[in-house]
Image (tube, helix red, strand yellow):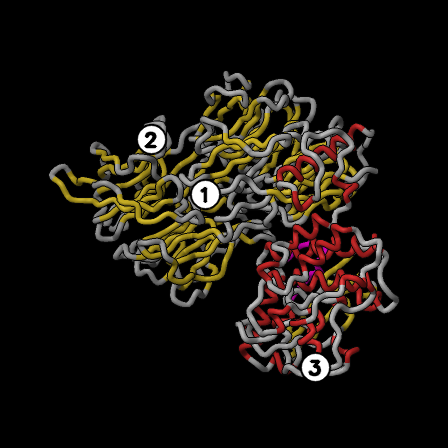
Amino acid sequence: MYRATDTKLGRDVALKVLPAEVAQDPDRLARFRREAQLLASLNHPGIAAIHGLEEADGQLFLVLELVEGEDLAERLKRGPLPLDEALAVARQIAEALEAAHEKGIVHRDLKPANVKLTPDGRVKVLDFGLAKAWSGDGTVGTSSADLSRSPTLAQTGTAAGLILGTAAYMSPEQARGKAVDKKADIWAFGVVLYEMLTGRRLFEGETLSDLLAAVLKTAPDFTALPAGVPPRVRRLLGRCLKKDPKERLHDIADARIELTDEEEVVPAAPVIVPPRRASALVPWAVAALAIAAAAGWTLLGGHPGPAPAPALNLAVLPPSDTVSSGPIDLSLDGRQLAFTAAGADGRARVYVRSLDVAEARALPGTEGADAPFFSPDGRSVGFFAEGKLKRVDLAGGPARELADAPEHRGGSWGAQNIIVFAPEGGGPIFRVPASGGAVAPVTALDAAAQETSHRWPRFLPDGKRFLFMSRKPKPPGRLAVEAASVDGGPRTRLVESSTGGAFARGRLYFVRETTLLAQAFDSRTLAVSGEPVPVAEDVWRNLNTDGLTAFSVAEDGTLAYRRGGLVKSQLTWLDRQGQPHGTVGPPAILGDMHLSPDDRRVLADITDPVRDTSALFVLDTATGTTTRVTLGAGNQSTGIYSPDGRSIVFSWDAEGAYDLYRREVGTGGEPSPLLVSSVWKFPESWSPDGRFLSYTQSEPGKPRDIWILPMTGNAAPFPFAQTAAEEWGSAFSPDGRFLAYVSDESGRSEVLIRTFPSSAAKWQVSTSGGASPVWRRDGKELFYLAPGRTLVAAPIRSAAGGLEPGTGRPLFHNASLRLATVAGATPYAATADGQRFLAIVTVGEAESSPIVFQTAAPR
């Protein structure tokens, strides 16, 4: 290990040089590169970060965060740690392990030498997963003193039958050479905690064989623990050190909760839930204690300060058998949480959790809901569903429609009983009375700045002014939090941000990348001061919906946020039963995709999480090789191939609105503009003869329409489906005589087919909702996505009047199938024979993103 200076960024770093025996082994070198990429995804204050994998003069080395201070092994040479210090260190180790386990990363080599104690009292866990890549030749020292720092015992890989880990701290299953999971880290955590409390190693041995035998057979000696160790900590050690992993503590998060001082979870104000051992509490009950603790802090006279200091950080999940992701909202008093979750039928509903009862309850009439937000008194909830802004009272009664919101980007309910909301992805913020009535814009896009959207509003306490996120196509400062008023007038730009903002107790909260920040903010003068302070890491973000705000803050400063970092997707081959048959390329932030006519290439837009902009890439379906095909500032998206596969048409917001551009594939030429105007346009389908292009056109305040652009001659575009309803998602039939598309003219999105170019004859294909139609290339089937992410195949037969759609047959349901994010986007494609599908499958989306409650510590 070497200390060095990064001259580009002006920071001190640590360099770890790759041993020659690893660098010369192609298999181990490739595995090391893959692991370095995986570890780079970790973003937690308790984990020493990896900055990069570099090469110079043929020598490979890791660039690591330089962590000052002594390691825990050095500290333990001076004896055991005081009880409060040991528990504090253990809590921080548990937090770091929890963050890694949630990413699917197991440390496998936790030991005191890999725990750094910084001079300011923080803990940094080092070398996550590197033992696996730094596997040596299996030799270790034989003296007892060397065994606690012995090199990793391994050959190559991680399969069962190989020993992985440092001998004195490895779990029994590691010692036996079996495959391991997070339970191995839980064992090592227990061994390290025991050593911190007693000042001696739990297992001893003069040789490696003796030491492994002790790990396998010797029972831990808990009589060596100091008399002052609380019973709850003794119980925790016993559960961590079960030799059978099935009997061991299930999750390191339970250890973190158990190590939280009992005084920290006893509220200063009365609560209904009686205090018990933290690990025995239902997660929502623990959250109730957390919120009550925050309320107690307020009653005791807390006031805003320069930096929030978390006292509790408790993860909870929505009800069992539901899947939840997306925006959340806390009531102003912090006593209720609103979120959406989808049950077995795949339809999302609004759930409200009052923290003094045991269960969250679904609100009737909220099917298909998204982005809920509370009324100021906490008695009603606004939400979006079926292209409408709606509200529902918690006491009961039907949901009421308030306004059209075809492609919403959030809303907020102010103290003056006004709701501000963004009805579409590309437009300003509007206002509407909470009881319903006239809808009027309250912001205006700045044409000079080429603004494309205002979204995710949040009211300030006066109920008149609100925060919102503005979006421009070009950096710097492409996304920012601004303030405006329901009366219109000038706006105030506040901070650059990756999401919308929120305000509480003198602080402005916002996210950059995946870090939730707080900065001093005067809500009366709209003045931001000081520097932003990190509040939480690994905040859930879906870049397919710019600025989505997956956190909320109550008046007293209590936070709720989704944890999970950036949402990524994977191009995955599925058969007609939904079984996976390989992937194309690595996981990425995918927006949409289009399969080439020969099924050998796929055109996809991929978002760069650093620049927060998207570009088009071609991926080889056989090798996964990825090649960028568009350049330039702004966002390029929704690309489609020409029938001969030689050209692509795509949307680009280089001039502000999304316009249509064309580029030849495999050439270095610049893209040429096809259609540039002030409205948003997204290409959807190219007729088989290459003569026509269908696209969706979207203007603020108007429903989406389907237009046709002639690709030969100089003919002007003409509308194909232009009604008071929303129409989008068009797809030419293989013979070019018909156009399938989606319309909500019935009050629900359904798949229809019309003749082309005239649209006199029309047939409805779906019967219970549908979107994203895709033709089989012989025209005998039309596929579409039904509600609940179910892929349906509808037979299509020729008939005297044109065609005759048959009854759709569900092929498979997949909760991780990505849905279309913008008009024109296609989240899947069918091969020519209709036997396989290349689909965008969200990585980890089938599991709910945990919601974390975080309260501020008393000052």
Looking at numbered disc 3 in the image, what kind of residue is underneath it? Val
Q: Nearer the viewer, residue 67 or 7?
A: 67
Q: Residue 140 carries which label?
A: 3
Please identify the quarter of the rendering in which residue 560 is found. Answer: top right
Instruction: Identify the residue shown where x is 61% and y is 57%.
Output: 101
Residue 198 included in the magenta stretch of the image? no
Expressed as whole percent of the image width and height from the top left, the position of residue 667 reads 41, 62
Whole-angstrom CA distance, mark 1 to mark 3, is 54 Å
**Main SS class of the magenta portion in the image:** loop
Q: In which quarter of the image is the N terminus?
A: bottom right
Residue 562: percent from left, percent from top: 60, 43
Q: Which mark is residue 216?
A: none
Identify the secondary structure beneath mark 1: loop
Please state which of the two labelled residues, at mark 2 or mark 1, is closer to the viewer.
Answer: 1
The residue labelled by disc 2 is 722
Name the element at disc 2.
loop
Q: Which residue is drawn at 70% across and 67% down?
A: 219
